């Protein structure tokens, strides 16, 4: 990918909690590696993914040409597909077991977990969300990215 907004991607990861799990979804631009929006939820429904997607459109005022996801039920739901295709964006889904197709967001998950979430204590989804918010601010504005010359 050679330009911003050519391809956006998304994925969900779990956040271990003292009582169960939280779930983190992020929308990322492949070229800039910027996290455009994210959300933490206590359930893995499509709604929290669509809220993050809407936030990405609102914050950037832009849209990608292609949107890459895995084949999770949130991203194959009619609501998600309509939110993407309704904006004339091409949907592309990873092949089964093809984590490499979305390697950039997989690296994001590794970074947020090892650099923030595993180092701090949190009891609630709200507390985890604040930690993620702090880290995303750092990631987008202060963290060096070797692929971008930093």
Image (cartoon, rainbow, N blue to C red):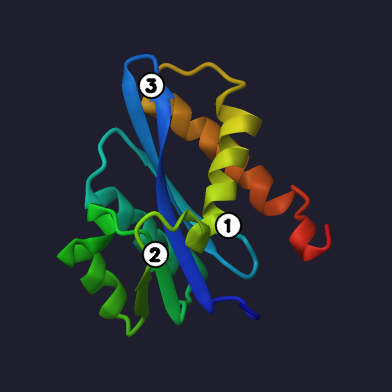
Q: How many marks?
A: 3
Whichever of labels 1 and 3 marks the residue nearer the N terminus, that label is: 1
Whichever of labels 3 and 2 marks the residue nearer the N terminus, that label is: 2
* Image x and y of residue 54, in percent: 35, 63
Q: Is residue 53 above or below residue 38?
A: below
Q: Residue at x 45, y 82 (%)?
A: 65
Secondary structure at badge 2 equals: loop
Disc assigned to residue 44: none
**Dot 1 surroundings within 10 Å: few (below 14), some, or many (20 or more)?**
some
Q: Which residue is mark 1?
A: 104
* Image x and y of residue 113, in percent: 56, 33
Mark-to-mark CA distance, 3 and 2: 32 Å
Quick check: marks 2 and 1 in contact, CB under 8 Å?
Answer: no
Which residue is farthest front? Answer: 97
Disc assigned to residue 94: 2
Whichever of labels 2 and 1 marks the residue nearer the N terminus, that label is: 2
> Which quadrant holds residue 3?
bottom right
**Dot 2 surroundings within 10 Å: few (below 14), some, or many (20 or more)?**
some
Q: Residue at x 55, y 28 (%)?
A: 117
Depth order, front residue of 103/50: 103
Which residue is farthest left? Answer: 78
- State which mark lies toward you, 2 or 1: 2
* Image x and y of residue 74, in percent: 25, 54
Q: Which residue is mark 3?
A: 124
Which residue is farthest bottom? Answer: 88
Depth order, front residue of 45/59: 45
Secondary structure at badge 1 equals: helix
**Dot 3 surroundings within 10 Å: few (below 14), some, or many (20 or more)?**
some
């Amino acid at each position: 990918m050679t330009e911003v907004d050519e391809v956006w991607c998304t994925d969900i990861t779990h956040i271990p909690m003292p009582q169960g799990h939280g779930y983190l979804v992020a929308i990322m631009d492949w070229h800039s590696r910027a996290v455009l929006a994210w959300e933490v939820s206590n359930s893995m429904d499509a709604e929290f993914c669509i809220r993050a997607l809407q936030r990405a459109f609102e914050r950037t005022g832009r849209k990608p040409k292609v949107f890459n996801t895995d084949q999770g039920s949130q991203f194959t739901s009619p609501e998600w597909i309509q939110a993407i295709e309704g904006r004339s964006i091409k949907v592309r889904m990873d092949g089964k077991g093809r984590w490499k197709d979305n390697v950039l967001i997989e690296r994001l998950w590794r970074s947020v977990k090892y650099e923030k979430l595993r180092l701090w204590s949190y009891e609630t989804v709200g507390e985890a969300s604040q930690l993620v918010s702090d880290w995303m601010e750092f990631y987008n504005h202060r963290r060096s990215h070797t692929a971008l010359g930093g």
